[in-house]
Image: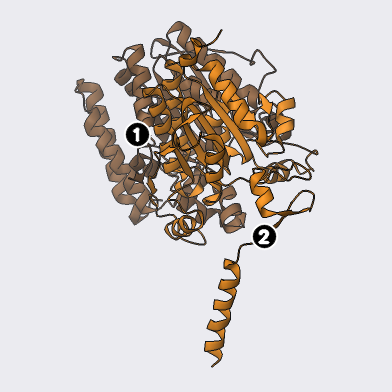
Amino acid sequence: MALERLFRRRRAQGEARDIPELWVKCPKCDAQIYKKDLETNLHVCPKCAHHLRLPADKRIEMLADAASFEQITGLKPTDPLGFVDTEPYSRRLERYKKEAGRPDAIVGGRCSIGGVESVLLVMDYAFAGGSMGSVVGEEITRGIELAAEENRAVVIVSVSGGARMQEAALSLMQMAKTTLALDRLWAKRLPYVSILTDPTTGGVTASFAALADVILAEPGALIGFAGPRVIKQTIRQDLPEGFQRSEFLLKHGMVDQVIDRRKLKETVTQILKLLHPRTVNHAR
Amino acid sequence: MPNESEKPIEELEAKIAELEGFAASSGVDLSDELQVLRERLVQLKSKTFLSRWERVQLARAPGRPTTLDVIEGIMTEFVELYGDRTFGEDPAVVGGLARFEGSSVVVVGHQKGRDTKENIRRNFAMPHPEGYRKAMRLMDLADRFGRPFIAFIDTPGAYPGISAEERGQAWVIAQSIQRMARLRVPAVAIILGEGGSGGALAIGVGNRVLILENAWYSVISPESCAAILWRDAKEAAKAAEALKLSAPDLLSLGIVDRIIPEPSGGAHRNPAATLAHIKQALAATLSELSSLSPEELFEDRYHRFRGLGRYES
């Protein structure tokens, strides 16, 4: 009897979770926002303009021209080291896949952005905190190579805790691999715009994300090499207000602009059109 | 006093020494045979007694040859060059011009202190952005004068501090990776002790990457990995095993190309023998690369790194 009750209770909880939440609380100003309003406002708080995390699919919807996106990613991760910490990596991968609804922390494809033929690559924080292992490194590399081959611009939206520990040195090598691929793009003089969103740290910042022709950051995003917790442990003192946020990086000369998400597509389009060799002839 | 488990190792070491002597006196090229025997020796040693965590301890042992010890030990005419021409001089990274086996080369490396005072001055070989900009300046020099570029890796990682972040630590690491990838001269990276993450890779984009037998190379130190995944830095030994950060692991993954043997008990037990092994391995590697043209060297490096990663389609 007790067992039956237990199962009944679990089912009831599961059903409750299926009912969509209608209201979302802004983590910055605590305002209650109607979910539909938040979505139409690109997940930017209508009250305080705080940028909430935007799901990868929404990001594509927002940047790619309508119906132009054609997915090119889909590689699956393996467990090359047989990594086990408190849980085997292979089991974590299964869970991440369910949570994110894709095989790894990236989705990308061919598309046009404001009419400019591009390859758009978007990292997905929902999968293992957007960490970069072999799959992310390979997809970024292939995307860049494809762009070079087909004379497309490249736009990469980063959101990542850094290189993925469970693939250890293989993850580290993705930093070199993605960086090397960019040379193929440079050789063809095709533009690459890197968009840094909250958070972008570690091996992702220290490779392809920092090497773009133009680097844009969303307001208030945490961006850096070492994470704030590690720095705090190392230097044993409190970190200054706003440290490692987009505005801090702008002040220190590391990014070109801090840009409101609601103006992002317009700005990216403008930059691509100004730089892309195919558009030169149209300029007057 | 050698125990039973060390006996086959001693026998193999004796055999290698004998063959080396024969090769030297007769002029017969036995390098392939010797390489096979040396790799077997490394495997034998790793199976016999050293865990990955024990190797990490050896990689950090006081008295282990540092970058300057190696440069001074296997090269001549070393002229150290200081500064990044932009902001300052970072003593965690050393470099300059030198002569190796008759040819002039450009060298750079992370520099640990040989005592506590020097370690503090050199920030325990954890570079700031200036250090990587110095390395890039030396890469420019190597390219301009067509000299081989030799990098020695020995860092726990790039420095995680406020000033380093303010001056773009991530940016300079990315730039250094890119700059080294673009070299049109032979580039060899040798991991001497610790290969800590992006701070190591920044000068690790060689046509060939060599590693000392007990050195480690990974995406994170075992302590930091343990602190994150086990929520306890004391589980570092477990993290070291899971990360597969040892030289034989890295060789089987294709991340390094050659293991440089260390004397029994680690490099610090017999630095002179260690330096001799490094010299021999570096000479052999440079001679392998000597027939490649500048463009071939660039493409060779591109393809070396392009192939790294494991995934399913």
Residue named by callout 1: B307
Q: Confirm whether circles 1 and 2 share one chain.
A: no
Q: Is residue B140 above or below residue B215?
A: above
Q: Residues within 10 Å of mark 1 (few under 14, many from 20)?
A: some
Q: Is residue A175 above or below residue B6?
A: above
Residue A22: mark: 2
Distance CA(mark 1)–CA(mark 2): 47 Å
* Residues tagged 1 and 2 counted as in contact (Cβ below 8 A): no
Query: Which chain does the brown colour mark?
Result: B
**Residue A37 visible somewhere in the drawing:** yes
Q: Residues within 10 Å of mark 2 (few under 14, many from 20)?
A: few
The quadrant of the image that shows the C terminus of chain B is: top left
Q: Which structural element holds mark 2?
A: loop
Query: Which chain does the orange colour mark?
Result: A
Q: Chain of mark 1?
A: B
Q: Residue at x 56, y 7 (%)?
A: A284
**Residue situated in front as seen by the camera: B204 or B213:** B204
The answer to which image quadrant residue B175 occupies is top right
- In the image, what residue type sits under mark 1? Gly
Q: How is the image coloured?
A: by chain
Image side of residue A240 versus residue A122, left or right: right
**Residue situated in front as seen by the camera: B92 or B186:** B186
Q: Is residue B195 above or below residue B76?
A: below
Residue B308 drawn at (x, y percent):
37, 36
Say how many tags the image has: 2
Image side of residue A103 versus residue A59, left or right: left
Residue A159 drawn at (x, y percent):
58, 41
Residue A212 drawn at (x, y percent):
55, 24
Tell me the mark number nearer the camera, choosing from 1 and 2. 2
Q: Which structural element holds mark 1?
A: loop
Q: Residue at x 43, y 48 (%)?
A: B244
